[in-house]
Amino acid sequence: MDGFDWVEIDWNRKFYEPGSCMVYTTQDRFDPEIKFITQDGRPETGIIQKWVKEDKDGQNMMTASGYFSEVIVSRAARMSPCYTTAATSFADLQSFLTSTDSAWTHVEWPFITPTIQDDRKSKVSMAQMSYEGGGSIGDYLYSFLKSSGKCSFWYEFKGNSAGVLHIVDANAFLTPTKELWFRKNLGSISELNFAVDQTDQFDHFYITQEVPEGSGFTEMQSAVQSDGTTKYYIFEEYHTGKNQMETTAAKMEAVKVVNSNISNIEIVSANEAAIREAMKQAAVLEALNHRELQTVDVSVLQNEYIYLKDYDLGNWVHVADDYSRNSTLWDGFLEERLGSDRLAQIVEIAEVHKDNLMEATVSLGDTQRASGNIL
């Protein structure tokens, strides 16, 4: 950011979605032809996509903003209109993203098709998910890689040359040399905010799969469509066993119907056992997207741990709340969820550069027990 003078720069880095940037300066200091900006020590390239001119205190001010280059991936799409079973290994994923087999099965990129590079330090097995033709490749990748060992990607923009799409894990940008503890009584943070969100939680799933008429599947059901035609389905049921909506006063159970759309197994009765197992796996993955979320935001003090030296985006940290036990009503609730030691991933770092200072706000994602498996 040495190319011009600025009043304020916001550099909002995110692990599971495209981050964003903003430059605020006087109009005469910013060349409207500037389209891409970078910042020392950060891998991202900001793409300027919006300009706002305003008169403020007698000066012509300019705000230029946009997303990081990962948005390029979010604006790519695979053309096939059908569901396609996607990667179970890095080689599969690479083939899925770069295939040029036909006009209907290749990925259409806004720029030149990038090189796909596996930068994961821990080569965890990838999950198996399905991609719906025409959907955003970036949205698919974020969801798919998050379920594959809490991994993600970043896009190395190279102008008119082919960029590099880096598949990365939690230590992509920095490998901590010591365990990181975010806790007030250790002096590493000044504030801790803890949120529990059950608004999109489902505990009971019915999984459907369309099958041909007369195909011989057990317990087939028929359904008349709006156009008067009849389709045939088989069903599976899945319970998470984690019904958080049950109280002493009432018991409610949120139910969700999921269409499995299996395409990597021939839909014939001889494959019924494998098909039903794949349906259950589809429900398990759906349940991961509809569970109780527990998130933590902290204000990190830059004395115990130094940003970009001791921690960076994607890293896992220990977090504990030195909460007051004056109210016994909260003891069980907090102890069950936050306890004395949780692990959480740094999923967002919002930098604000202003008045010769840089402030960084760290957001942590869904937490898990410290005894759990990180990767």
Image (cartoon, rainbow, N blue to C red):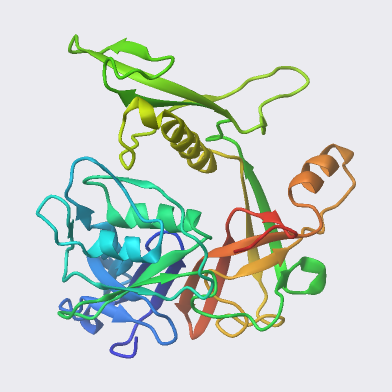
Q: Residue 54: image x %, image y %?
A: 26, 65
Q: Does the rendering let one see residue 51?
A: no
Which residue extends farthest bottom? Answer: 2
Does residue 189 appear to the left or right of 314 in the view shown?
right
Q: Residue 67: image x %, image y %?
A: 32, 65
Q: Does the rendering let one see residue 169?
A: yes
Residue occupying image coordinates x 64% and y 61%: 344
Residue 81 sits in quarter: top left
Q: Residue 70: image x %, image y %?
A: 32, 66
Residue occupying image coordinates x 50% and y 61%: 125
Give the number of marks: 0
Q: In this rendering, is residue 247 above or below 227?
A: below
Residue occupying image coordinates x 67% and y 75%: 301
Q: Which quarter of the rendering shows the C terminus?
A: bottom right
Which residue extends farthest left? Answer: 103
Does residue 193 appear to the left or right of 53 in the view shown?
right
Q: Residue 129: image x %, image y %?
A: 40, 47
Residue occupying image coordinates x 38% and y 83%: 39
Which residue extends farthest front? Answer: 270
Q: Which quarter of the rendering shows the N terminus?
A: bottom left
Residue 100 sits in quarter: bottom left
Q: In this rendering, is residue 311 above or below 279?
A: below
Q: Nearer the viewer, residue 188 or 174?
A: 174
